[in-house]
């Protein structure tokens, strides 16, 4: 399989600008990185930004289920590249976002502060589409991070598992007619149906960070193994503890602490006796404390205090048999596209990390 991730630094609230940036990164990528792709994966909340302080602040950017700017971009890009496209977006589970007049605020006690919440049903979601314009998977985040909890509900269906049809017989081209031809041909080549688990960021962690053995929920690695999934796709907006100066000084260096943590959480898959393809698509950049628009009027509200920084370090690899084989890891503050041929990894390409199970 040929798999690509698009790592970018979306700006909070600037959806059109972030979409334009994603297009620019794709058009400027080396043609070889987009050749014969099976799937392109983008981060969590790829075009809206992540660090919203409340439901009120993110409401203008919630997208109707499968009909918002993120899904439309994915459909256009899938048709152009001739591959599946996965992108994260903030979903409102109703036909369209409500107007300020229809919002009915209620108050709940959050200890030292009180926050307005609105009677909306919103999810942190990820959608996957194919070149024929079909939605092949839609997943809502199950384990919410505290930043999600102020606006999103937990996905009601648990972790996402789908039998996904991949067709690697399509060659990308910038030609509109060629793209149209590929869309018609999709599914008529050498198709493979592969059981795939979709997850988002905090899903990799225990629910509410509960200690091992204290939660009734199945962990993400256990779900992958119990469903016999062959691919794990994690779209994420994973934070880093690195200072801004370290990100700026060496942007192409991966965040090794984050990589080590990811590998530790994947240990049940690493110790499995078969290889599982893992796709981790993270964002990079920083979202500083700033004023975000207030849908019900006023001057806005502060987001994130001094701000948050993201770890980048997106990667694609084969995990199993006591090792991790990775083609390349993106830098911690690097924007761009990387693609990996997993068949080459299976033949010894890329770099390899031998892992030992902790006792």
Image (cartoon, rainbow, N blue to C red):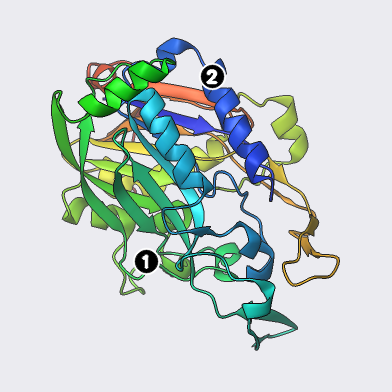
Q: What element carries label 1?
A: loop
Q: Report the residue marked by disc 2.
A: 27
**Residue 272: percent from left, percent from top:** 20, 43
Residue projecting furthest to the right: 299
Does residue 228 appear left or right of residue 131 in this picture?
Answer: left
Quarter containing the N terminus: top left
Q: Give residue 8's quadrant in the image.
A: top right
> Is label 2 in contact with label 1 (beta carbons under 8 Å)?
no
Q: Report the residue marked by disc 1.
A: 212
**Residue 334: percent from left, percent from top:** 61, 27
Does residue 166 appear left or right of residue 324 in this picture?
Answer: left
Q: In the picture shown, does residue 68 fall above or below 21? A: below
**Residue 120: percent from left, percent from top:** 53, 75
Residue at the spot x=63%, y=69% of the render?
55
* Neighbourhood count class around disc 1 (C-alpha, 10 Å): few under 14, some 14–19, many 20 upward: few
Residue at the spot x=33%, y=29% of the render?
83
Q: In the picture shown, does residue 324 fall above or below 358? A: above
Considering only order in the chain, which callout, 1 or 2, is on the residue closer to the N terminus? 2
Q: How many labels does the image show?
A: 2
Residue at the spot x=46%, y=43% of the render?
72
Q: Give residue 128's quadrant in the image.
A: top left
Front position in the image: 192 or 199: 192
- Can residue 321 be seen here? no
Residue projecting furthest to the front: 177
**Residue 147: percent from left, percent from top:** 60, 63
Q: In the picture shown, does residue 165 fall above or below 146? A: above
Residue at the spot x=50%, y=42% of the render?
43
Q: How far apart are marks 2 and 1 (CA)?
A: 44 Å
- Can residue 113 be seen here? yes
* Neighbourhood count class around disc 2 (C-alpha, 10 Å): few under 14, some 14–19, many 20 upward: few
Q: What element carries label 2?
A: helix
Which label sits in the foreground, 2 or 1? Answer: 2
């Amino acid at each position: 399989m040929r798999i690509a991730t698009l790592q970018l630094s979306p700006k909070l609230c600037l959806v059109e600008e972030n979409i334009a940036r994603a297009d620019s990164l794709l058009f400027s990528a080396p043609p070889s990185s987009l050749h014969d792709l099976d799937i392109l994966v983008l981060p969590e909340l790829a075009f809206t930004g992540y660090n919203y302080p409340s439901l009120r602040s993110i409401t203008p950017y919630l997208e109707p289920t499968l009909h918002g700017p993120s899904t439309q971009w994915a459909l256009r890009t899938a048709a152009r590249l001739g591959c599946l496209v996965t992108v994260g977006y903030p979903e409102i589970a109703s036909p369209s976002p409500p107007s300020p007049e229809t919002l009915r605020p209620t108050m709940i006690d959050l200890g030292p502060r009180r926050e307005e919440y609105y009677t909306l049903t919103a999810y942190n979601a990820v959608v996957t589409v194919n070149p024929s314009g079909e939605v092949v998977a839609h997943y809502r985040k199950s384990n919410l991070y505290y930043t999600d909890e102020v606006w999103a509900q937990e996905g009601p269906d648990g972790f996402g598992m789908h039998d996904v049809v991949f067709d690697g017989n399509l060659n990308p081209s910038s030609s509109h007619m060629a793209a149209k031809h590929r869309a018609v041909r999709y599914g008529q080549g050498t198709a493979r149906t592969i059981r795939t688990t979709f997850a988002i960021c905090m899903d990799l962690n225990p629910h509410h960070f509960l200690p091992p053995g204290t939660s009734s929920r199945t962990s993400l690695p256990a779900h992958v193994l119990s469903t016999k999934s062959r691919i794990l796709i994690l779209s994420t907006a994973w934070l880093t503890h690195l200072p801004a100066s370290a990100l700026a000084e060496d942007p192409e260096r991966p965040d090794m602490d984050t990589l080590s943590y990811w590998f530790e959480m994947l240990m049940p898959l690493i110790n499995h006796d078969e290889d599982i393809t893992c796709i981790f698509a993270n964002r990079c950049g920083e979202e500083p404390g700033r004023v975000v628009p207030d849908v019900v009027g006023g001057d806005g509200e502060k987001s994130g205090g001094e701000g948050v920084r993201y770890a980048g370090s997106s990667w694609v690899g084969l995990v199993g048999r006591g090792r991790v084989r990775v083609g390349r890891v993106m830098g911690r503050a690097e924007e761009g596209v990387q693609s990996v041929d997993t068949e080459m990894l299976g033949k010894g390409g890329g770099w390899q990390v031998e892992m030992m199970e902790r006792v």
